[in-house]
Image (tube, helix red, strand yellow):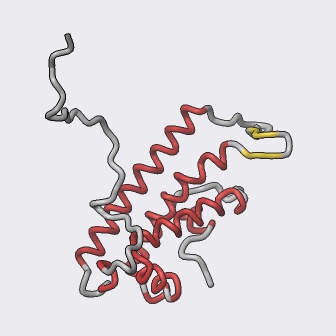
């Protein structure tokens, strides 16, 4: 059964270099498929995965999100690789590998693009619930990624009512 996204999709959507080996992005593509199942739900994912040729309108939103999500996950594997001698960075003849801060910037950019595409996908699904009736269905308490379960980072300034200001 064909995947929803492949290396060719990453190359087309994210402009990934055509010389990148598939083995370096395969785990990230698998991660994107697992995340897609959490967004669409098991029923929706199974339908789209099995007959994705009939979901072309939906795939216009799903594929870009999955591609950028996969790139966010693939950058560390593209940066360094484990071998029998340990973890190493490969430097070619005419280029040097990026540093850790540059890698963090690439990951952050891919994450931002993925979050943007996910928001567009969710808005599209919400606007077309009559077509995608399975979207709101939760099967056996499955884990879902939606507006209420997105990870939110930050600092909480909440102070408990039992906390006293006096520190004497």
Point out the image quarter for the C terminus. top left
User: Is 60 or 101 nearer to us in this picture?
Assistant: 101
- Report the number of numbered marks: 0
User: Is 77 or 105 nearer to us in this picture?
Assistant: 77
* Residue 112, horizontal then vertical, whole percent: 40, 49
User: Is 72 or 38 nearer to us in this picture?
Assistant: 38
Asked where in the image residue 21 lies, by quadrant, the reply is bottom right
Left or right: 21, with 157 as reference point? right
Q: Measuring 80% from the left and 40% from the top, which residue is drawn there?
A: 86
Vertical order, 68 against 82 (above or below): below
* Residue 84, horizontal then vertical, whole percent: 85, 45
Q: Measuring 31% from the left and 38% from the top, which residue is drawn there?
A: 154
Q: Measuring 43% from the left and 71% from the top, which residue is drawn there?
A: 62
> Which residue is situated farthest in the top direction here?
168
* Residue 33, horizontal then vertical, whole percent: 53, 69
Point out the image quarter for the N terminus. bottom right
Vertical order, 73 against 52 (above or below): above
Vertical order, 71 against 54 (above or below): above
Left or right: 88, with 135 as reference point? right
Left or right: 78, with 92 as reference point? left
* Residue 64, horizontal then vertical, whole percent: 45, 65
Asked where in the image residue 134 lies, by quadrant, the reply is bottom left
Asked where in the image residue 41 lies, by quadrant, the reply is bottom left
């Amino acid at each position: 059964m064909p995947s929803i996204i492949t290396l060719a999709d990453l190359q087309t959507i994210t402009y990934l270099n055509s010389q990148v080996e598939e083995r370096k992005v395969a785990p990230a593509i698998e991660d994107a498929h697992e995340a897609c199942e959490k967004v669409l739900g098991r029923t929706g994912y199974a339908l789209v995965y099995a007959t994705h040729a009939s979901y072309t309108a939906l795939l216009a939103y799903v594929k870009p999100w999955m591609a950028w999500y996969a790139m966010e996950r693939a950058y560390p594997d593209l940066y360094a690789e484990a071998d029998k001698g340990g973890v190493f960075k490969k430097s070619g003849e005419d280029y040097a590998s990026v540093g850790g801060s540059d890698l963090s910037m690439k990951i952050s950019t891919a994450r931002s693009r993925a979050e943007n595409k996910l928001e567009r996908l969710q808005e599209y699904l919400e606007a077309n619930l009559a077509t995608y009736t399975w979207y709101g269905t939760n099967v056996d308490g499955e884990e879902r990624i939606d507006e209420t379960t997105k990870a939110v980072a930050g600092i909480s300034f909440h102070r408990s009512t039992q906390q006293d200001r006096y520190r004497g």
